[in-house]
Amino acid sequence: MNEKRLVVACFGVLVAAALAFLAYRFIAPLTVSVFLYYSTRRYHKSLKRLHLPSRARAAIVLASLAVPLVLLIGYAVVLLVVDARSFIMEYALLDVAAARLPWFEGIGTLPPLTIDGLYTAYQSGQLSPFITFATDHAAFLTGLLSELFLDLFVIIIVTYYLLIDGGRLREWLLRFDDDAIVRDYLEATDVELEAVLFGNLLNVIAVALIAIASFTLYNFVAPEAVEVPYPALAGALTGLASLVPVVGMKLVYLPLAAITAIPVALTGRTDLLVYVVGFLVVAVVVVDTIPDIVLRPILSGENTHVGLLMLAYTLGPVVLGFYGLFLAPILLVVGLTFADTALPRLLGVDPIDADDDSLSDSQRRLDDF
């Protein structure tokens, strides 16, 4: 019997090693999937009021995330391409590029961004340098796009089935119970992860709405020369950037202030810079500081320290790369919950009962007077 147990144990170790290798290979999309699952699980549960099956509710949740994100990215890309074309044509950057980059030779102007304009440019050979560049780097571009779509596929599939079968996975984990330590720890971690990550989703939405309203109201007051370009898009990007505390939102509104200030400064209309300063004050106080002070403590979970959470969001990408933005807060919650629930019991310390109304040794009773 012992030999059979040893064989089964060795087989289990091999299977666990293979699964760990696959998980490490796809650690970025799996981390994002877990982040999205806990961020949207409460929303998925709330859809039960509509008496929809679990699969339909999971599809609605993913569509609610994917459609706005795709529209936002598509809108940003279109605006970037249009504005970049106008900037290149206005300042004759094609001539500068042709003098420094040989494959730009013969390109005197950029085609109109229409189907007819692009087709005419293709027939005339005007797009040949770009086609040659894409052909020369086809392997790199194909690998990059393939990896991107594969990661997106993994994120969608894993998040979808976590929303559907997350309860089954939870019950399976609770089978490995030992004097209720495992159960208490897993339940506390599950609750805190949902509170923290769902709170961050609400924080992103709230900051985005505040930023959109603030930028739009600023444009009503400011002259046209110093208006914020595309306030709705800028506000939505500010909300996404709020995932990274301290520096995140500054990555959006500081470039906006620079884009607004540079043209009026170059034309000598320095009197309009007071509006740019006003925009910075609004962005720093209304968009950045007040939500960070008021909203983040409310939406940061029940037990997780706000300062540690901010450090996790800030240092995670530095240490782990892009996916560290999602993995670091998860690891923080898992570690802090273990230290709070399981570790004291493993060390033989009695857990603190929140309902215990016993007095401390330093506190006196009425009979002591």
Image (cartoon, helix red, strand yellow):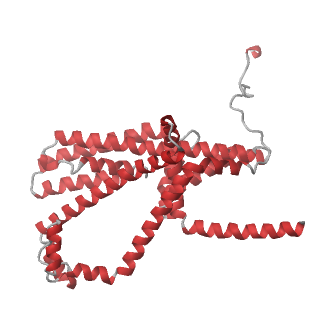
In the rendered image, which quarter contains the N terminus? Answer: bottom right
Instruction: Name the residue nearer the viewer: 52 or 6.
Output: 52
**Picture quadrant where residue 3 is located:** bottom right
In the rendered image, which quarter contains the C terminus? Answer: top right
Looking at this view, name the residue that lies furthest to the right.
1
Left/right placement of residue 207 relative to residue 130 reads right
Left/right placement of residue 239 relative to residue 18 reads left
> Where 197 sits versus 136, above or below?
above
**Picture quadrant where residue 190 is located:** top right
Left/right placement of residue 346 relative to residue 137 reads right
Residue at 24%, 78% in the rendered image: 130
> Where 351 sits versus 100, above or below?
above
Whole-percent x and y of residue 345?
76, 44
Residue 288 seen in this snapshot: no
Residue at 56%, 52% in the rendered image: 162
Instruction: Name the residue nearer the viewer: 131 or 296.
Output: 131
> Where 205 sits versus 123, above or below?
above
Instruction: Name the residue nearer the viewer: 185 or 251.
Output: 185
Instruction: Name the residue nearer the viewer: 223 or 82.
Output: 82
Whole-percent x and y of residue 306?
52, 44
